[in-house]
Image (tube, rainbow, N blue to C red):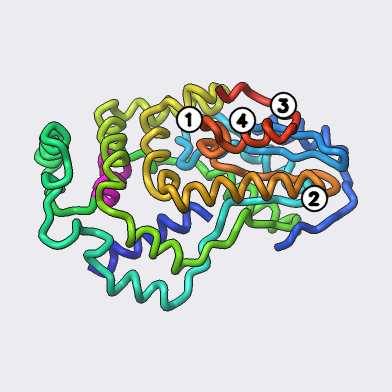
Amino acid sequence: MMKKPLSFLCLAALIAAPLAAQEPETPANAIVVTAQRSGAPMWTIDTPSGTIILVGEIRAIPKTTPWQPERLEDATGQANRVILGARPKVSPGDVFRLMFSGDKFTKLPDDKLASDYLAPAQWARLEALGKAQEEDYSRQSFLLTSFQLLRKELRFNRDTARDASDVVKDAAEKANVPIDRAATLRGEDIIDNLAEAEPQAHIPCLGAAMDALEAGPDIVEQRGADWRRYDIPAVMANPLETALGRCWPWADETLGSELRTIWVERLAEASTAKGTTLAVVPLRVLAESGGVLDQLALRGFDIAGPAWK
């Protein structure tokens, strides 16, 4: 009972140094070329004082996806600064709250059943999946069920390569390149946000997770292949990417909106910095309708890179 809540702490950790000016040692265009040779989709923004490189990240890239992270490492070592995703600041008190909240995060409230919240067709679908997998989803929280379907059944996070953010973080630390975080989120706020969400808020996530599972395991490698081919609309339309985007925290009206706004503001700030800024941003946040790329374009930034819509 104490292990499951901790999994949410790990989940929260998936979603999270001041900017320091340095004299560029390598021309910005050379850094861009090196980064692009990694095969990861990216966009560049030229500013009056430098360049911003936006790497569009998907998590859990299959090992079969042919990209070259060492090229991204080389580019990172030549950058003036790096921006990575928001990081949760978790206190010992937050850990104890998770440990002793127990069923609040893993079960439906009171004595409610999934069938009390789902339409008959939705419940029949979930019940059929549970029987096929010898699992009982009738009392389990919809968010936990969703991630169980994606991780345990679809196995999208098995046999994966290093994520772009991990590649850049390790390379930046090795080369002493300053690392900035888009934001630092309080663990207390993350826990409260999740605890206050009504079960109905996670039903779209559950539906999308069932869609992804029923679409079959081929969508996992297809997502990686489309990412490597820079077919951004295809990645965004992939049932797996759709499911991840409809689940907490990204689908949460408060936390998801905050994370998107933070990225726009941080990148706007980086546009005034001297030299090259390399930022690793979740692709779904960059390329979704009204997302970071759309908002930066509305602010007048000239964005070069793959078509994202």
Report the magenta residues as a range: 142-153
Q: Report crowding for label 3: few under 14, some 14 to 19, many 20 or more residues within 10 A (C-alpha).
A: few
Whichever of callouts 3 and 4 sits on the residue coming sooner in the sequence is: 4
Whichever of callouts 2 and 3 sits on the residue coming sooner in the sequence is: 2
Quadrant of the rendering where the C terminus is positioned = top right
Q: Which residue is mark 2?
A: 80
**Amino acid type of the residue that numbered disc 3 sits on in the rendered structure:** Ala
Distance from label 2 to label 3 (Cα)?
20 Å
Residue 91 visible in this rendered orientation of the protein: yes
Q: Which residue is mark 1?
A: 224
In-front residue for pair 152/114: 114
In this rendering, would 178 be left or right of 126? right
Residue occupying the point 71% across, 35% down? 299
Q: Secondary structure at mark 1?
A: helix
Distance from label 3 to label 4 (Cα)?
11 Å
In this rendering, would 22 be left or right of 84? right
In this rendering, would 109 be left or right of 150? left
**Amino acid type of the residue that numbered disc 4 sits on in the rendered structure:** Pro
Q: In the image, which is nearer the foreground, mark 3 or mark 1?
A: 3
Q: Secondary structure at mark 4?
A: loop
Q: Which residue is mark 4?
A: 41
Q: In the image, which is nearer the foreground, mark 4 or mark 1?
A: 4
Whichever of callouts 3 and 1 sits on the residue coming sooner in the sequence is: 1
* Quadrant in the picture for residue 67: top right
> x and y percent of residue 248 in the render?
39, 48
